[in-house]
Amino acid sequence: MGVAISGTGGIFMDTSATVRARAWLLPGVALMTVATVAACSSTPSASGPATGSDSSVSLQDSYEQVVRTVLPSVVQISTDGSTGSGVVYDSMGDIVTNAHVVGDAKTVDVLPASGEAKLTADVIGKFTPDDLAVIRVTKDAGKLKVATFGNSEKASIGEIVLAMGNPLGLFDSVTQGIVSATGRTVSESGAGGATIITSAIQTSAAINPGNSGGALVTLDDQVIGIPTLAARLPDAGGAAPGIGFAIPSDTVRSIANQIIKTGKVTDSGRASLGITAQTSADAEGQGVGVAIVDVASGGPADDAGLRSGDVVVGLNGEATPTLAALEADLAVMKPGTTVTLRVRRNGSVRDVQVTLGTLSS
């Protein structure tokens, strides 16, 4: 049985969109998300490790301490169509969230964890390929508590983590789980384009609609990820229990800092061909390649002599029957890498060397 991935940002969000023409292969769009982990260990006493009820009390105290410390930094974000979550990033009123939470909105409403009156925030920038956005509260930013972002590279399987957000509109909700896996590459398609999450952290903490943009937190009070995706079982039509994904905090910091500084992303660390493309299908609707719709002037594909109408059927010896397959392969590559594309043009097939560029907004 296959597993599909669905976004969790808005309660009314439609996550069934099919893959269509996408612009993220251009040097200016790309999407990823990574889950973060929490480490928890019981500190031994002088007479030996804590056992029995003492150990339970210690763990419960740790949970409660994390919630008291971090939950005040998680806000609810509302647009005309849905609600989601966000995490206070700095003392200037900047809040990080998912791009699919803000959608096309220019301003959003922010409800602080204190439950006081809603604040208005401007959307100062978003980077759809990594499903990240930054909003800025325009007044009373001093009422917000800044979160501490940890190092997501230190996340390890089995670490305890808490997911904090506003699932299904339930304000200030917390779920718990572990880091189930690290380094995942998962994808989702939606109205804003393709989401390709690399280095994602998989967690068993429940991730539901409205959790998107919230915090995945360790027992050291560190935010190590932004929950953004949950797995769904296509045949059953519901969520796959205990399988959620978050954008790693290292990615969040990199993208957020660029957006805050310039309003856009110039160095995503992700590779780009510099094309707009769509899946080319046969009479039965099966993907047979990736048809190039447009080529960015001066981009990698343009430099290699590719043009609109070419169909990419392979990358480094592997077939690329669909746009999703090509995007997934590119997502794990670095800018500056030279790849071999197998391209069909006017009935003939040839191999073309292309040096990948950098995806930017």
Image (tube, rainbow, N blue to C red):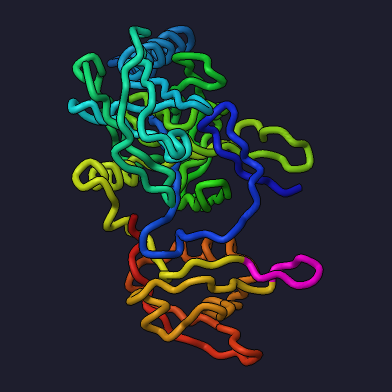
Asked if 20 appears above or below 1 in the picture, the reply is below
Rendering quarter of residue 152:
top left
Q: Nearer the viewer, residue 176 or 3?
A: 3
Where residue 50 sits: x, y (%)? Answer: 40, 15
User: Residue 195: image x %, image y %?
Assistant: 51, 50
Q: Is residue 338 left or right of residue 151?
A: right
**Residue at image x 55%, y 32%?**
204
From the top left corner, tell me how far across and down residue 156 is, in percent. Answer: 42, 40
**The quarter of the displayed image where residue 325 is located:** bottom right
Can I make out residue 29 in this image? yes
| Quarter occupied by residue 348 | bottom right
Vertical position of residue 222 compared to residue 43: above or below: below
Residue 260 lies in magenta, yes or no? no
Q: How many marks?
A: 0
Looking at the figure, which quarter contains the C terminus? Answer: bottom left
Q: Nearer the viewer, residue 73 or 104?
A: 104
Q: Is residue 250 left or right of residue 213?
A: left
Question: Is residue 240 shown left or right of residue 236?
Answer: left
In the image, what residue occupies the spot 43% across and 55% down?
30
Residue 342 rendering spot, x and y as whole percentages:
55, 83
Q: Is residue 35 visible?
A: no
- Looking at the image, which residue is at 65% across and 31% down? 241
Residue nearest the observer in this picture, 4 or 286: 286
Within the magenta stretch, is there residue 280? yes
When the figure is inspected, residue 42 is found, relative to residue 28, above or below; the finding is above
Which span of residues is magenta-colored? 279-287
* Residue at x 41%, y 80% (from the top left corner): 354
